[in-house]
Image: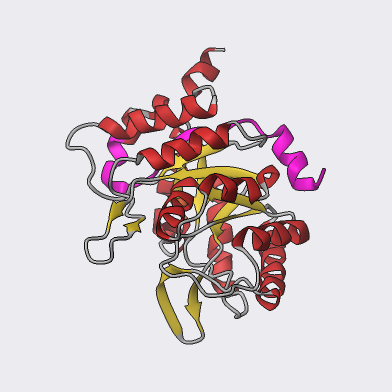
């Protein structure tokens, strides 16, 4: 057992939830008894302190997990402590048990890439990432959960597989993992590998949360893209079913949906949230409140 697996052991389930988006704010609050928790994009608030009261109000309706997109933990650059200060403020408002981000790079010296770019899985970058994860966890006073991202092309002869990088990073930092099941599905389709085996090879005892989303086929490249705007595909559901049979201590799953909102209410989004909850066998907030 480690400090983090101990924490997971005693942490209550988060359940099945939905990414919080302003466009569907009112509908989400209206249906809060069907949405067990929400995930907010941390930078939306970190860079807009005038929205911090509003963030506190969202927390009156749902447990809130902040999810970041600009930490760039995979860049060989020092942490931006001005940025981290704002991220810590968001974490203090939400009082979340962990902070989630991506195992990727969004910045290089002098350049903002503006995209979750994959990193090279080398020993030297592992040392850099380990050092930065430890610093972030110390600074925030809570575990960091890092997410697997999609990638467009395979780098020939990688020094180590992505799953080995995740395992070694977890061994040296005791950080958590956010497993994006749709990203596993999309990468397994685009790069022709076994998604179930990929999940088995991840450090499942440190996976705290999942993402699911709908992707689409790119017309030009014949590749699947993680668009976050379509219904969740069968391939993601099949992987989620397989994952639910593996030993783990996963606490929650967020449906990421960023466009093509239903015209009225939340329609298929709530059905998707409910289906994920049933597959993972979590009680709903409604059931927990009744019990
Ligand atoms: Fe994701």
Question: What span is colored magenta in the figure?
Answer: 1-27
Magenta stretch holds residue 11: yes
Specify the quadrant that holds the N terminus: top right
Residue drawn at (58%, 66%) of the image: 85
Residue lying at the far bottom in this picture: please name it: 110
Q: Position of residue 212 (x, y in %)?
A: 43, 43
Q: Is residue 92 left or right of residue 29?
A: right
Q: Is residue 177 left or right of residue 127?
A: left
Q: Position of residue 131 (x, y in %)?
A: 72, 70
Say whether residue 35 is visible. no
- The part of the image, by quadrant, that contains residue 166 is bottom right
Residue drawn at (47%, 87%) of the image: 110
Say above or below: 250 vs 87. above
Residue drawn at (34%, 35%) of the image: 28
Say above or below: 108 vs 272. below
Say above or below: 265 vs 195. above
- The part of the image, by quadrant, that contains residue 136 is bottom right
Q: Position of residue 204 (x, y in %)?
A: 66, 44
């Amino acid at each position: 057992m480690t400090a983090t697996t101990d924490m997971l052991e005693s942490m209550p389930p988060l359940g099945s939830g939905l990414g919080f988006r302003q466009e569907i704010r009112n509908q989400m609050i209206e249906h809060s008894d069907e949405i067990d928790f929400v995930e907010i994009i941390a930078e939306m608030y970190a860079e807009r302190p005038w929205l911090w009261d509003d963030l506190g109000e969202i927390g009156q309706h749902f447990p809130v997990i902040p999810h970041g997109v600009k930490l760039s933990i995979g860049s060989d650059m020092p942490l931006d402590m001005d940025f981290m200060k704002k991220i810590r403020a968001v974490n203090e408002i939400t009082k979340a048990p962990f902070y989630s981000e991506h195992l990727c790079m969004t910045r290089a010296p002098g350049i903002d890439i503006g995209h979750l770019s994959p990193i090279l899985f080398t020993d030297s970058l592992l040392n850099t990432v380990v050092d930065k994860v430890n610093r972030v966890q110390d600074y925030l006073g809570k575990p960091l959960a890092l997410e697997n991202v999609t990638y467009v092309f395979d780098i020939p002869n990688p020094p180590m597989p992505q799953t080995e990088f995740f395992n070694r990073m977890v061994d040296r930092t005791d950080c958590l993992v956010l497993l994006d099941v749709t990203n596993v599905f999309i990468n397994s389709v685009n790069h022709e590998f076994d998604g179930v085996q990929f999940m088995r090879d991840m450090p499942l005892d440190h996976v705290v949360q999942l993402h699911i989303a709908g992707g689409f086929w790119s017309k030009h490249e014949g590749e699947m893209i993680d668009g976050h705007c379509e219904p969740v595909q069968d391939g993601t559901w099949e992987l989620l079913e397989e994952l639910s049979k593996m030993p783990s201590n996963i606490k929650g799953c967020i449906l990421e949906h960023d466009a093509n909102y239903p015209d009225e209410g939340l329609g298929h989004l709530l059905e998707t949230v409910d289906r994920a909850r049933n597959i993972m066998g979590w009680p709903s907030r409604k059931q927990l409140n009744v019990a």
